[in-house]
Image (cartoon, rainbow, N blue to C red):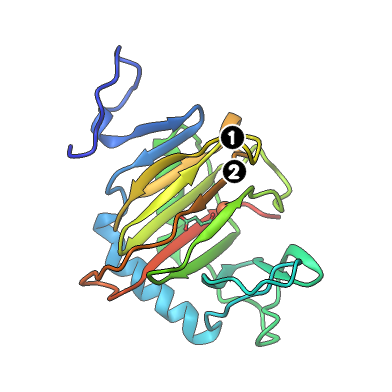
Amino acid sequence: MKRSKATSGDLFAVPRSEREAIAEGAWLLPGFALGVADDLLAAILQVATAAPFRNMVTPGGFRMSVAMTNCGEAGWVTDRKGYRYQPVDPETGFPWPAMPAAFLDLAARAAEAAGFGGFRPDACLINRYEPGTRLTLHQDRNERDFAQPIVSVSLGIPATFLFGGDERKDRPKRVPVEHGDVVVWGGPARLAFHGVAELAEAEHSATGRRRYNITLRKAL
Ligand code: SIN
Ligand code: FE2
């Protein structure tokens, strides 16, 4: 497979082309979601009709360049009061749209492929990027149970996923991600700093000048 790097030893139970280690507990599953990408994109647009994409404000007062929405029992939000999960969309006053079955199914299969069995997310953050937008290094730490992994699916134009260590100063690894790629992290990597480098100008047949990322988590 095109991006597989040679590794020494026969470390993995599945062929290397199906998963590539990013760090201990973190895996890239190249093309894992390709077969359901159209379904995922249709579900994203459906969610966005009820809970529109919006640019949220960080506790420090900066408006994020990445537009976000959520589905599932709880949605991740940020405003001047802080980061948190909440069951109601602050923009609409209604509960977030239900988690599409296609999201649940993919999340469980991807987590399993990365060695995390029985994953059942209750929260899904949907990010929308355009060329020039980026997501600064951060930890996902608003969830209750850090024993649960995180599944992150890339759709549309390519990006560089940054995957660091447990401290912000740890130099992140640069992982190219494209349409249909899935990254799963948990265990020793669960609290790793991660982010997305500024996107370059690009166009994709399925999304135009956009990248969508869905991040599936067990938050509650
Ligand atoms: C995130 O960390 O919430 C999103 C990561 C990504 O867009 O790949
Ligand atoms: Fe994150």
> Could you tell me which quadrant the N terminus lies in?
top left
Instruction: Tell me if I can see residue 217 in this picture.
Output: no
Query: Where does label 1 land, which residue?
Result: 170
Decide: few, some or many residues near mark 1? Use Cα within 10 Å; few <14, some 14-19, many ≥20: few
Residue 185 drawn at (x, y percent): 51, 39
- Between 139 and 153, the one nearer to me in the picture: 139
View extreme (top): residue: 9
Q: Residue at x 64, y 47 (%)?
A: 139
Task: Determine the CA span between mark 1 and mark 2.
Answer: 8 Å
> Could you tell me which quadrant the C terminus lies in?
bottom right
Three-letter amino acid code at disc 1? Asp
At mark 2, the secondary structure is loop
Q: Residue at x 56, y 42 (%)?
A: 149
Callout 1 touching callout 2 (CB < 8 Å): yes
In the displayed structure, 123 sits above or below 147; it is: below
In the displayed structure, 52 sits above or below 212; it is: below
In the displayed structure, 87 sits above or below 103; it is: below
View extreme (left): residue: 1
Query: Where does label 2 land, which residue?
Result: 193
Left or right of residue 152: residue 158:
left
View extreme (right): residue: 81
Closer to the chain start, of discs 1 and 2, is 1
Instruction: Tell me if I can see residue 1 in this picture.
Output: yes
Decide: few, some or many residues near mark 2? Use Cα within 10 Å; few <14, some 14-19, many ≥20: many
